[in-house]
Every structure is written in C-alpha cells, then in structure tokens.
Amino acid sequence: MVRPPLSPAERERGERLAQLLRTARGDRSMVSVAADGLPREVLERLPAVQRVHADRGRLTLHTSDPDQTVRALLQRAPHVRVLEVTRAGMEQAFLQLTQEGGTR
C-alpha cells in the first residue's frame, strides 16, 4: 500500500504540532530514584522539582534543573540506590500538554 504524499496543509499542521511538542518539552528533565524509606514530601521540596510521580518502587522527579535537584537529593538522601537523569521526551511533552489542557 502506497500512501499519497501529504498535502501542504497536512505538512503545516504536522510542523505546528512538532513545534508545540518541542516547546512543551523545553528544558524539562526527569530524575528517577529508588530509595527505600525516602518520604515523598522530602522529594517534593527539593529545588526545581515541579512534580513527583511514584510507580512500582521508583520515584520520578520532574525538574527544571536536574543538577540542582540531584545535588540536593544526595545531601538529604545519600543512601539512594538507583539514580537516573533523563531529558523529557516527546511523550512527556505530549502528556504535559494534555494534562494542562493544551494551554500553550
């Protein structure tokens, strides 16, 4: 099956969506940790943390400054077992846009 080429209007809509997702992703990063006994409230008060999500023993911190967040985390919880820092991807940007109700 051969798909017909995209029309100029379809390409333009695709470019607008891509730009919107890039803007939503911005400089957001995620810090994932596995730290037994670390209260969620401690993580929520770390510098630059915007949101904390828990899933199967891992906590994901959505942060605008991962360096600052990790330094503060390690000062408060040096017993952290697993630490991973990733940049927010397109999936996270899409979820952020849809959770915010598309306000961007």
Image (cartoon, rainbow, N blue to C red):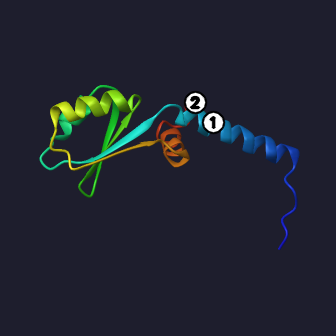
Q: Secondary structure at mark 2?
A: loop
Q: Nearer the viewer, residue 103 or 58?
A: 58
Is residue 3 shown left or right of residue 69?
right
For the point 27% across and 30% down, the residue is 71
**First-in-chain label (1 vs 2):** 1
Q: Are marks 1 and 2 in contact (CB under 8 Å)?
A: yes
Q: Nearer the viewer, residue 77 or 2?
A: 77
Q: Nearer the viewer, residue 50 or 36?
A: 36
Task: Name the spot of residue 54 as percent of width and height, x first.
Answer: 28, 49
For the point 31% across and 31% down, the residue is 69
Q: Within 10 Å of the Cα at label 2, are there few (<14), some (14-19), or many (20+) other Cα atoms? A: few
CA gap between label 1 and label 2 equals 8 Å
According to the image, label 2 marks what residue? 104
Compared with 35, 19 (above or below) is above
Task: Name the spot of residue 2 as percent of width and height, x first.
Answer: 85, 69
Q: Amino acid at mark 2?
A: Arg
| Disc ID at residue 29 | none
Q: Quadrant of residue 48?
A: top left
According to the image, label 1 marks what residue? 20
Q: Secondary structure at mark 1?
A: helix
